[in-house]
Image: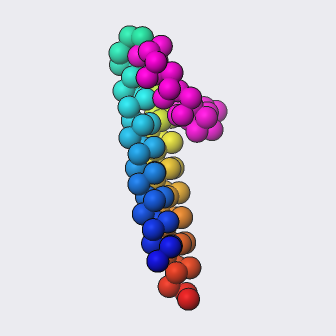
Amino acid sequence: MFVFWLIQLISKAIYLYTVLLVIYALLSWFPGGYQSSFGRFLAKICEPYLGLFDHLNLSFGPVSFNIAFAIIVLQLASQALILILNRIVFMF
């Protein structure tokens, strides 16, 4: 059925984006990580979403938890979307 395929596609896309966000966060540990071609590629993909959380200022000392919070929000939103799609399928 199309909806089950859609749920699987959404799930895999969210997982891939979460992995990219984690890699983007880990690049901060390497000097010049963001200036590499891979770092610039990840910045183009990740920064528009992460920019939504910049105003929260979830920093404790030099450590920022904005990316962790963004990942949690992404996972919760994906689970809610999958739940809604499942409910729509089983209504019919």
Q: Main secondary structure of the magenta part?
A: helix
**Between 65 and 21, the one nearer to me in the picture:** 21
Quadrant containing the C terminus in the rendered view: bottom right
Q: Is residue 22 above or below residue 35?
A: below
Residue 61 visible in the current orientation: no
* Residue at image coords 38%, 10%: 31
Residue 58 at x, y percent in the picture: 52, 33
Q: Is residue 17 above or below residue 39?
A: below
Q: Is residue 47 left or right of residue 67?
A: right
Residue 78 at x, y percent in the picture: 49, 58
**Between 91 and 79, the one nearer to me in the picture:** 91
* Residue at image coords 42%, 11%: 32
**Between 65 and 17, the one nearer to me in the picture:** 17
Q: Read off the magenta span.
A: 33-60
* Residue at image coords 48%, 58%: 10
Q: Is residue 70 above or below residue 45?
A: below
Q: Is residue 63 left or right of residue 84?
A: left
Residue sitting at the far bottom: 92
Residue 36 visible in the current orientation: yes
Residue sitting at the far front: 1
Residue sitting at the far top: 31
Q: Quadrant of residue 53?
A: top right
Q: Quadrant of residue 56?
A: top right
Magenta-colored stretch includes residue 40: yes
Residue 25 at x, y percent in the picture: 41, 29
Magenta-colored stretch includes residue 84: no
Color scheme of the displayed model: rainbow
